[in-house]
Amino acid sequence: MKTSMKSLYTILLAAVGLLVLGACEKIIDVDLNDAEPTLVVEANLNNEFGPQTVVLTRTTSFFTPETPGAVTNATVTVTDDQGEEVTYDEVEDGVYVAVFAGVPGRTYTLQIDTEGETFTAVSEMRPIVSLDSLTFSPGGGFGPQEGPPTFLPFTNFNDPDEKGNFYRVTEVSEDPARTAFIYLLDDLATNGNLVTFPLFGNSLIAGDTVTIELWHLDPAAHTYFDELGNTGGGGPFNSSTPANPTTNLDNGALGYFNAYSKSSVTEIVLP
Amino acid sequence: MKQQQLRTLLLSMLCAIALSPAWAQEKVTLSGTIKDGSTGEDLIGAAVVIPSMPGTGAITNVYGFYSLTLPAGQYTVRYQYVGYEAQELEVDLTSDKRLAIELNPSIEQLEEVVVTSERLDQNVTSVDMGLTKLDPAQVANIPVLFGEQDIFKTIQLLPGIQSAGEGGSGFFVRGGSADQNLILIDEANVYNASHLLGFFSVFNSDAIRDLQIYKGLMPAQYGGRLSSVLDVKMKEGNNKEFGAQGGVGLISSRLTVEGPIVKDRASFMASGRRTYADLFIPLANNDDLDGTQLFFYDLNMKANALINENNRVYLSGYFGRDVFAFAENFGFNWGNATGTARWNTVINDKLFLNSSAIFTNYDYEIGFGDLLTISSGLQDWQLKEDFFWYPNENNTVQFGFTGIHHTFRPTTLAAPEGGPFNDSDATDRFALETAAYVQNDQKIGTKLSVRYGLRVSNFNSIGPATYYTYDGGVIADSVVLGDNEIGNPYWGLEPRLGFSYLLSPTQSIKGSYNRTYQYLHLLSSSTSANPTDVWIPSSPTVKPQIANQYSVGYFQNFDNNKYETSVELYYKDMANQIDYSNGANLFGADDIESLIAFGRGWSYGAEFLVRKNVGDFTGWVSYTLSKTMRQFDEINEGNPYPARQDRRHDIAIVGSYQLTPNINISGNWVYFTGNAVTFPSGKYVVNGQIVNYYTERNGYRMPDYHRLDLGLTWITRKTERFEGSWNFSCYNVYGRQNAYTITFEESETNPGETEAVQLSLFRWVPSVAYNFKF
């Protein structure tokens, strides 16, 4: 529902924009303070056996063209609520990896020790919600269509009966020309239903192969990704005060620790 | 116990009035109404004076009623009102007497722009502070964006009142939030006073007779909002003859008709306005736009009837809506509807009663074809009794009580059975807000006037409902109310105190103390007015907002009251202010209350005003120096930070010059310090995306804002029966690129690099409108 609200405002504001004579944008110089470099954590953990990754960087000043510096020589461990502990290895600067599979239903604690400071975060791996299939319906493009008819994929999965499930849906593709889209869903309006959600993003024609992944998220991770999409005030007309996304890390670190279960489906587009 | 204290207090106040020495003498009362002789409309604030007894007089109340008690005798009584010919009557006052007076507009003053009303020296002599009155017709020449006359934009040019944004109609009063303004149209609360995302207000100037804004000492009859009262009265309708006025502008057209139903006894007024940007869509010849709608309209209607000398009834209504639709797939509309039924009765020569029954509704609806409908709203039913008691010439007592039944409809989803969406299970919430008040305006000698009043307010939730309390965002406890069960009570004691002391006939000092309670809170995820913003009631988690305001002022008029000047200083503290947990997304949130942060705010400042009210040249210069802060434990590490509306300097210069009897030129220039904003102090990368890193709340400033607008009104045709005029204006004449927003984002041309992008709206916006009256 949030997605539709946002596009709603975009349309409405574009319409108002018609009234806004002489509106213009320009790049300006602004004097900004330089905040103390702060630890940024990107930690994902899922239920498939393979490399689980934690990336550690630090913030930089806003206008610097340099890429954020990696945080090296940190100690990274993940412990679950059954007492099993995994230690990550630094495979390249700032990238820490351990090869294992998370278990849905368990709660994981991430601990990072670097330069005498300790940062922790807790995330629950929610049960797998199976993405059963995709449905392709004709259409999916805006405006006049050229070339072969296009199709819009819809998800088919069953939301559990209990309210409070959060998802992230993405298309997995090796093709860099395809737009990487992310949809964040909740079940406030769809609890317990078959969720058929339209995945606007890439035009598909008959014969294309498409892979869609459904992540079942810890609510805190959903909040983080949702706010990440809204950070900066959400566009020129939405003047809400910008803020850092709410993180599940403690001790002032930025970023997130996201334990999730995933399921995916690959289908060939058939009319 | 509180009630006991209250009763004691009320009794002692009444005793104070009754024991004043004037009470003991032989007295008679002169009372009645003062009306406009050309239209039959009540004149608010018209004066009755006895020239032989300086300092003795009365002023009509908001319903046009006056009452003056004098020793029995022969008097010359003078009735006067600015812009009207005064009338003097010889009155043999041996017993109580009722006189209904009609004053005629004075011919030579008709062309003048008079930005005041009442007695010329009212601003010096009255106890009122932080009060401004505007007559829409009298500020009609001020140039505004798109030529759409809007009283909300005019009041923003006054000291202490700030615009919420470029071209917008929202405003902040003395550091208060936008939801702390009580906006009344014919006594009905308007919950969302803006159209089209705040660029226009819901008030069509043609339908408005009178406007008062209180930013300081709030009379005890008003309550429910912390920072200001904007009391708007609709025209009553001419009860002498039919008339119409209207206009055609760039954005909208307007038409108002009024006239007698029964001559001199009953009249009506109906006024409509509609925008028409979307009427041109078919001309665009673009099939994609077929079925697209984008407009708003306002409809004001009022009727009144004099039943007999002592009784008069009024019915008025406002209906307005914004409609936006995109083919059949999508529709979005929102708006207010209000209705007021009023009964004025003169109980006796010294006691006047206004009874009102009021309805108000705000709602919005978003439809996605037949897939899903989202809606939310708020509805009030209110009863109100306001007494005006004139025990003797030195005291004017107002007392009364009111009760409002609120229904809050939270965001609700409705979807067809078997579809992908469920109906939502959010339930309506109900509340009862009541208040009783008493206030006395007392003259002590010829120099000192005091006002002391007390408003006692009470707020209760009404079941069925379950209210939760939270600890760190987690439910800690709950309060369950059964059907029609009342609970979660809050009491508010709201003293309203003020004085004015005349240093000389043209100089005075004033002071006031004011406490206000607010039981309803607007949750807004942004500072611009969004139709989907939600009002919520106070609850165990959400405490009432409380403000204390202290102010002192110096007032002086020069050159026979041609120039008014004033300096006011204020300090205001505000408790239980609300904000949202960082980035909270309100739409569809189940437990909205758990996402709110609570803190406090304070604001102080100095306001300077120099105003010229009469003559060919009129206008004012206003300057506000102020500071507004907020402090929330959860925000900015608990450190105080400037509120968004914290502006150090705010200047407005407004001028209007009558060049010839038919041509008026006008201009205004505004300057203010940029708002406090939050800019990033660093950046980082997450999921391949550059993310801004924010460290302090509102730690930066937008660039200073300034702008000049010019306007010209040219009466091209004027006969006894018809008047037509053209209005030309230009907004932002020198094309200053004022920053509307500054965003920090990844460069589109150099990916990986970051830049600051400033968006400016509205450079050189010319507009033209044709207005007529017959």
Image (cartoon, helix red, strand yellow):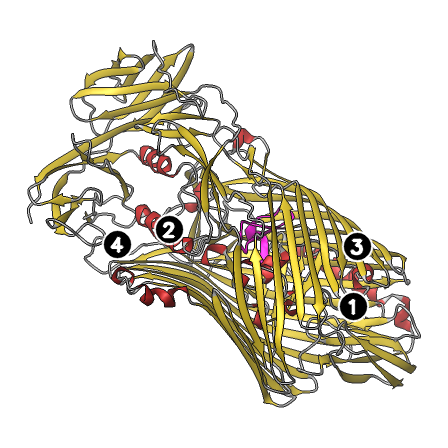
The chain letter for the residue carrying disc 3 is: B
Name the residue at 57% across, 71% down: B206
User: Is B561 on the left-hand or right-hand side of A155?
Assistant: right
Residue assigned mark 1: B396
Instruction: Give how far across and how far down residue B666 sits, in percent.
Output: 66, 61
Chain label for disc 1: B
Looking at marks 4 and 1 on the same chain, the residue that comes earlier in the sequence is marked by 1
Say if B740 sits above or below B337 in the image: above
Task: Point out residue A250 in the picture as x, y percentages from the top left corner.
Answer: 41, 23
Looking at the image, residue B638 sits to the left or right of residue B288; the answer is right
CA gap, disc 4 and disc 1: 58 Å
Q: In 3D space, how far apart are the residues under numbered discs 2 and 3 (Cα atoms)?
A: 45 Å
Residue A261 in the magenta stretch? The answer is no
Precedes in sequence: disc 4 or disc 3: 4
Residue type at tag 2: Tyr
Where in the figure is residue A159, as x and y percent of width and height? 21, 44
Q: Secondary structure at mark 1?
A: strand
Q: Is residue B53 left or right of residue B226?
A: right
Q: Are marks 4 and 1 in contact (CB under 8 Å)?
A: no
In front here: A209 or A248? Answer: A209
**How many residues crowd around disc 4 within 10 Å: few (fewer than 14), some, or many (20 or more)?**
many
Q: Residue at x 61, y 58 (%)?
A: B710
Discs 2/1, front = 2
Location of mark 3 (residue): B565
Q: Nearer the viewer, residue B756 or B521?
A: B756
Secondary structure of the residue carrying tag 2 is helix
**Image marks 1 and 3: residues in contact by CB distance under 8 Å:** no
- Write the start and end of the magenta stretch as one range: B162-182
